[in-house]
Amino acid sequence: MPSAPSLEKKAGEGGAFPQSEWQEGALGLLLLAAAELTALLSHLQTALPPSLLTGHPSLRLAHCLPATLRRQLLTLLFLEAVGLRRTWDLRGYTGQALALLTDRHRAYGYRHTERFLAELASVGADVPLTEALACWTASLWEREPQQRGNVVPIFYVDGHRKPVYADALIPRGLIGRTGKVLGCRALVVLHDQEGHPLLVTTHRGDQHLTIGLPAILTHYEQAAAMAHLKRVVVDREGMSAELLAALASEGRTVVTVLRTNQYTGVESFRDVGEFVPLQADRHGNMVREVALASFGLPLRCRSLDKSWKCEWR
């Protein structure tokens, strides 16, 4: 039988939580309150009706209670809040914050969470969940009428490739962070002008952004019941005459960047206007100027003229 001093020592050790754990718990509670306040969970649960889940009786998902479905969704939503970057990290997770956030005595483990994700994929839940997130972000970041005024909102589209390590061969692509060509998935991300993420779609790793860009614009307009996204900014991967012509025919204005092998200097542009200051160094010396100019892109034996800002040091 342990002595009294040892009992006091254990009680003292067990009565205090590590600072990192209670900080994670406090952050998670704030995120949980925000999810409830903005109706995120109701959007996601509405996207998973019983008719979708019960279509495959052999899956556990078909017999999932609403409370269980909610806890599993909360587990996926709050992995990052407790310092977990992926479901694999659940294998070594021993904290209590995630269990508290999901209203359980103990957090779901890795295998249970992976099975839940696999069954969601098998019933085709990715499409309704993506549309539900698009509706939620549209309502979350919607501007008030007095803030909108006559200003045309600007939307940013970017592409990323995330490496995926799998036993089967999957399409490969260039990973920008490492410069390596690996098996991957291509992500297309839509942001508003304040940097808020609005929609993310996943595609084959070898898909080019010129294919994903028109698709994500149309997808977001339909899912969020929004009018035309008229002004779009994309990086130089979107520099395609066919793409620009198609978007222009839809009444969109596209801002992009020329590739360095498309021009040699000011002489590559036509109708160059007056240069105006853009950036100065700490000593007040001008280091960058811009001017309006025209640049022609060949498009099936005809020229597509666009107005660009020509930057020249």
Image (tube, rainbow, N blue to C red):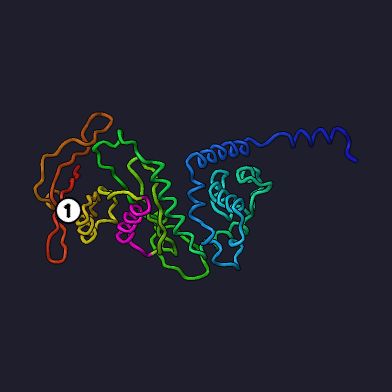
Residue 168, placed above or below residue 271: below
Q: Which residues are magenta?
A: 206-224
Q: Check disc 1 and give the amino acid type.
A: Thr
Image quadrant where one finds the C terminus: top left
- Farthest bottom residue in view: 169
Provide the secondary structure element on which disc 1 rests. Answer: loop
Q: Is residue 219 magenta?
A: yes
Q: Give residue 19's quadrant in the image.
A: top right
- Secondary structure mainly formed by the magenta segment: helix
Judge by depth and name the residue closer to the eye, 56 or 17. Answer: 56
Which residue in the structure is indicated by mark 1? 264
Where residue 36 appears, as percent x and y from the top left, is 52, 41
Tell whether 100 sits left or right of 13. left
- Farthest left residue in view: 271
At a point 48% along the width and 63% down the height, the residue shown is 124
Where residue 137 appears, as percent x and y from the top left, is 41, 46
At a point 8% along the width and 48% down the height, the residue shown is 271
Tell whether 126 sits left or right of 246. right
